[in-house]
Image: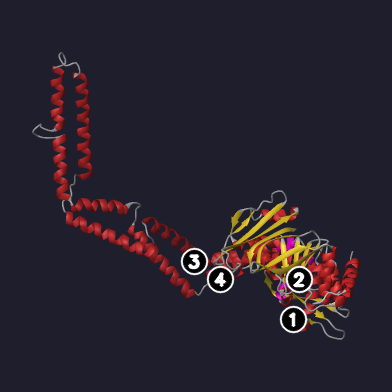
Amino acid sequence: MLSELQINNIAIIKEQTLKFAPGFNVLTGETGAGKSIIIGSVGLITGARASRESLRSGEKKAVVTALFTDISSHTQSQLEQFGITVENNELSISREINESGNGAARINGKSIPVSQLKDITPLLINIHGQHASQALLDEENHIKYLDEFSDVEKELSDYSVLFSKASDIKSRIADLTKDTREKNRRIEMLKFQIGEIGDASLKSGEEEELDRLRIKAENAEKLSKYAKFVYKALYRNEKGNSASDLAVKATEALGALSDVLPKSSEYSDYLTNFTYMCEDIAETVMKECGTDIKDPEKLLDQIESRLDLIRTLKRKYGNTVEEIVEFKDKAEKELNTLETADDTIVDLKNELDTITKEMASISTVISKKRRMAADALEERMTKELMFLEMNKVRFSVDMAKSDIYRPDGTDVVRFLISANAGEPLAPLAKIASGGELSRTMLALKSALSDKEKTPTLIFDEIDTGISGKTSYKLGVKLKSCSETAQVICVTHSPQIASQADCHMLVSKHEENGRTLTVVKELNKEGRIREIARIIGSEKITDKTLKAAEEMLCENK
């Protein structure tokens, strides 16, 4: 449940902490006191869009933090699918808003994308705003409500997997059965591309090797001259004056000095190593820089021609030789797919037939469960609506068979209602008034209360357009819903407020020239005065106080 809500710098709320109780909570207060700001703050926790206008004037940052406790094992397991671990049976969600209207979101202090809140928070809280009843007018939502009542979660999950596979296969078949001329053009293009790359016989590292060879060709004469000089100077000189030759002669001379030169042997070793080094350097220089290029100009032309070919292929197929080869591999696979498309299509259609039969089997089970649930829901909704003073109501779940497989099966569902005696059943959008729509939504919530898995339900002025005895009945239903979920309700109805387990008053006052919203939980005396205010509007009298006390006592 939502145990605590901390609001900092949102509109006219400077700093406020609301502590909610289990069961049935109500928020009351005069129009403009800040009740909508509180509901809007909860909306921010659920991922609603923020704006810099919601930031309190003169402040640079706003923060809303919600603390959820007593989280069920079912909800915890669902949260774990999003990588969220509940610690000590508590979960803290915060939302920050800066001057640009942006800001971070955090769960247990860890940053997450704001968009992820929309996936996570429905597991914890559901806000039924002043206009949320309008969702009932969209008949696409009716099947979702029926499914909550039908216990078809497993079948729908299995069906959804098959539907996704079938959609993918249909898409692949469509791609393979494109216009014949377009397909042939694609085949010819792929053959050309594969041939062009294949004829080039590209090798990995070829460009780098060509660049090195080009340098040799451009500097062939100079390289040959200096390479030969190094070779002769260090190792092979027909006159016997190379460094290597002289080192050998010096080594022999040192041998003759061994009697008088103690380190002659050590010096000889140095010179022997030097001889080997001279030989190694000479051989390496000749190998790397020596050239037997007879026609440098011709070789340069060949190199440039090859590099031009590679550059042309790179412009068409990739930034590197490796990417060009990868392009060729993909083109060959696509060509093979297109050339064997007819056989592939046959295989795919056979697979689709198998999947379709499985979908038909599962959708039949789903439809049967929905029909049974629809009958039960009709009976339950009729009772709920009659309790809410719609005494002549008739409620029906209309189910039709779709001629195509839909993401949720083969059923088309819509709710029909007749609010008055003698009137035919008709879609909600055509006949329901605002008050009737609110009652229908609450009746639906009540009917689904034993199926409802969301631990906290928020109703924002669900009593709009409703008064008197009907408001009392509305309060009874909200109280009933609070037996299976925490209920938080913003209301202007004394009949509803008097039935709450926890009553909070939202008011505003001026402090240091600024308007501030304050929320406080009312004791019995405070509740009597607030209910009396709602009853009597501007003036609280002994009569309204007595009526408020009686109303409060009757609901205890």
Residue at the limit of the structure toward the front, as seen here: 512
| Left or right of residue 518, residue 229 in this image | left
What's drawn in magenta, residue-wise?
Answer: 139-158
Residue ID for mark 4: 174
| Left or right of residue 93, residue 472 in this image | right
Residue at x 72%, y 62% (from the top left corner):
125
Residue 397 locus on image (x, y percent): 80, 75
Residue ID for mark 1: 429
Residue at x 64%, y 69% (from the top left corner):
513
Residue 364 shows up from this direction = no
Name the element at disc 1: helix
Type of the residue with mark 2: Gly
Foreground pick, 195 / 529? 529
Residue at x 70%, y 66% (from the top left corner):
359
Say few, some or many: other residues with alpha carbon within 10 Å of mark 1 (under 14 / 14 to 19 / 20 or more): some
Name the element at disc 4: helix
Residue contact between numbered discs 1 and 3, judged by CB atoms under 8 Å: no
Type of the residue with mark 4: Ala
Residue contact between numbered discs 4 and 1, judged by CB atoms under 8 Å: no
State whether residue 497 is above or below residue 105.
below
Residue ID for mark 2: 29
Mark whose residue sits in front, 4 or 1: 1
Distance (Cα) linking label 2 and label 3: 70 Å
Distance (Cα) linking label 3 and label 4: 12 Å
Type of the residue with mark 3: Leu
Mark whose residue sits in front, 4 or 2: 2
Name the element at disc 3: helix
Say few, some or many: other residues with alpha carbon within 10 Å of mark 4 (under 14 / 14 to 19 / 20 or more): few
State whether residue 293 is above or below residue 13.
above
